[in-house]
Image: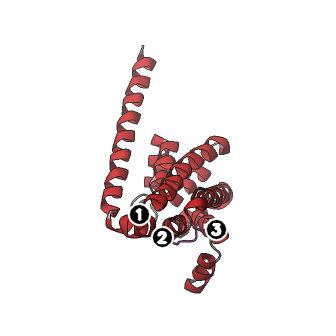
């Protein structure tokens, strides 16, 4: 697998397209896509946003393929993978819907794996069009942000990402908390209107 990843890295933009697709489709390559995008953006600032577009395209294609696979046989994946608690992810998804997918595609974190929520969306029969748009928005913001960071910081971009990981995790948690509050308020407003 390591040799295969090295080949993809040597392919540059085409490699990141394939790597991001594989990662989003369920092949685990933790942080490799982000680090490769940062490195390529720092090395080729004039092509950084083009590389980000390829990364987005690969990632969205991977998410959609995982989503459609889950619609057909996702329950078997959850049941065959004891490290993933089916009930917890489905409960979150049923309660917060596509907001869970948006947060994890925008700021992927290990405690909130994007793939689990993509699988939940497929298993629960979410409409593909809004799902696609939410994944696209999250990935556009995420990967264009990384491309911008690569352009601004140059060769220091990867080191910056590694040394400021806790800040990014804090941002992700703050975003989750803010989204949770918005959803709770809208839930209360909806239940209050239904009582009237």
**First-in-chain label (1 vs 3):** 3
Query: On the image, which quarter does residue 78 sit in?
Result: bottom right
Q: How crowded is mark 2: few (under 14 residues within 10 Å), some or many (20 or more)?
A: few
Dot 3 lies on which element? Answer: helix
Distance between the Cα atoms at labels 1 and 2? 9 Å
Q: For the N terminus, which image quadrant? A: bottom right
Residue extent of the magenta highlight = 26-32
**Residue at x 36% of width, y 56% of height:** 168
**Secondary structure, magenta segment, majority class:** loop
Marks 1 & 3, CB-CB < 8 Å contact: no
90 to the left or right of 73? left
Q: Mark 1 points at which residue?
A: 110
Most foreground residue, 80 or 189: 189
**First-in-chain label (3 vs 2):** 3
| Residue found at the far bottom of this picture | 3
**Residue at x 33% of width, y 47% of height:** 174
Dot 2 lies on which element? Answer: loop
Mark identifier at residue 13: 3
Dot 1 lies on which element? Answer: loop
**First-in-chain label (1 vs 2):** 2
Where does the image place residue 61, in percent across and percent down from the top left? 67, 58
Residue 125 in sight in this render: no
65 to the left or right of 41? right
Most foreground residue, 106 or 116: 106
Residue 43 in sight in this render: yes
Front position among marks 1 and 3: 3
Most foreground residue, 29 or 84: 29
């Amino acid at each position: 697998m390591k040799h295969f990843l090295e080949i993809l890295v040597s392919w540059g933009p085409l490699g990141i397209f394939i790597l991001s697709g594989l990662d989003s489709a369920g092949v685990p390559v933790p942080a490799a896509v982000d680090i490769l995008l940062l490195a390529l953006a720092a090395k080729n600032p004039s092509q950084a946003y083009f590389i980000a577009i390829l990364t987005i395209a690969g990632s969205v294609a991977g998410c959609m393929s995982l989503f459609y696979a889950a619609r057909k046989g996702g329950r078997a994946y959850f049941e065959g993978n004891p490290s993933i608690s089916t009930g917890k992810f489905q409960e979150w998804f049923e309660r917060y819907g596509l907001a869970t997918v948006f947060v994890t595609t925008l700021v992927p974190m290990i405690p909130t794996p994007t793939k689990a929520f993509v699988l939940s969306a497929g298993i629960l029969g979410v409409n593909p069009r809004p799902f696609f748009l939410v994944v696209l928005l999250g990935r556009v913001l995420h990967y264009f942000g990384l491309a911008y960071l690569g352009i601004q910081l140059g060769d220091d971009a990867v080191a910056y990402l590694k040394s400021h990981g806790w800040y990014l995790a804090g941002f992700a948690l703050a975003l989750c908390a803010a989204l949770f509050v918005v959803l709770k308020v809208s839930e209360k407003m909806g239940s209050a209107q239904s009582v009237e």
